[in-house]
Image: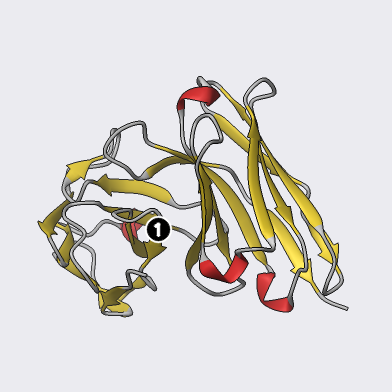
Amino acid sequence: EVQLVESGGGLVQPGGSLRLSCAASGFTFSSYWMSWVRQAPGKGLEWVANIKQDGSEKYYVDSVKGRFTISRDNAKNSLYLQMNSLRAEDTAVYYCARDRAADGGSDYWGQGTLVTVSS
Amino acid sequence: DIQMTQSPSTLSASVGDRVTITCRASQSISSWLAWYQQKPGKAPKLLIYKASSLESGVPSRFSGSGSGTEFTLTISSLQPDDFATYYCQQYNSYTWTFGQGTKVEIK
């Protein structure tokens, strides 16, 4: 059974940092692109970043470029999101998602972890 | 960046109704479009990928169509479990974007 379990969310002050983790199981993690998607309270979905199977390609939404870094450790079946210089507008539930091997879409999602940026 | 615009934002319908949601892209995305369903407090669920391919396990009352810049999600006969928010997502470019969502409410 495919499982994605996020962790690392919490309350952080503006300007602070947080590292999210996503533990994957039930599939060959190193064979899939992976994504982070967020959802601010009461708002819609926003794609944040994705990363190629071997970590050689990474893409970000403009609003997090230079502040967030996506990475992965295929030996540990884990995906990460390092978030620096956090702002109030980064407050959201952050989901990790597996991207389908072919033809696109994200077919498995974690339950999400809440990040709250507030003083 | 490619912008995705869904309509309507909210839709009121009854069980058994045929429901259609539209998604328009600011530029051609070929067929690189997915549809998701999300219920409150839950992660999104993939319904349709590559504009018209039904994800495994998704009921056949869901269908997708379109290419280029205009796409539709159709629910042929709305069921009680279908009241939720629906999002389109383009993945034509290296950076992906979602539509703003369409909430399907009980009439």
**Left or right of residue B11, residue B84 in this image:** right
Pick the front one: B50 or A86: A86
Q: Say if B106 sits above or below A75 in the image.
A: below
Image position, residue A83 (x, y; %)? 73, 58
Q: Residue at x 53, y 36 (%)?
A: A56
Q: Residue at x 77, y 50 (%)?
A: A19
Q: Quadrant of the C terminus of chain A?
A: bottom right
Callout 1: chain = B
Pick the front one: B4 or B40: B4
Instruction: Please say whether residue B107 is visible from this viewpoint.
Output: no
User: Which residue in the protein does label 1 denote?
Assistant: B96
**Left or right of residue A65, residue B45 in this image:** left
Decide: few, some or many residues near mark 1? Use Cα within 10 Å; few <14, some 14-19, many ≥20: many
Image position, residue B64 (x, y; %)? 16, 53
Q: Residue at x 60, y 46 (%)?
A: A111
**Left or right of residue A17, residue A43 in this image:** left
Q: Residue at x 26, y 79 (%)?
A: B8
Give the structural element (helix, strand or loop) at label 1. Answer: loop
Image position, residue B38 (x, y; %)? 44, 58
Pick the front one: A66 or A18: A66
Image position, residue B25 (x, y; %)? 24, 70
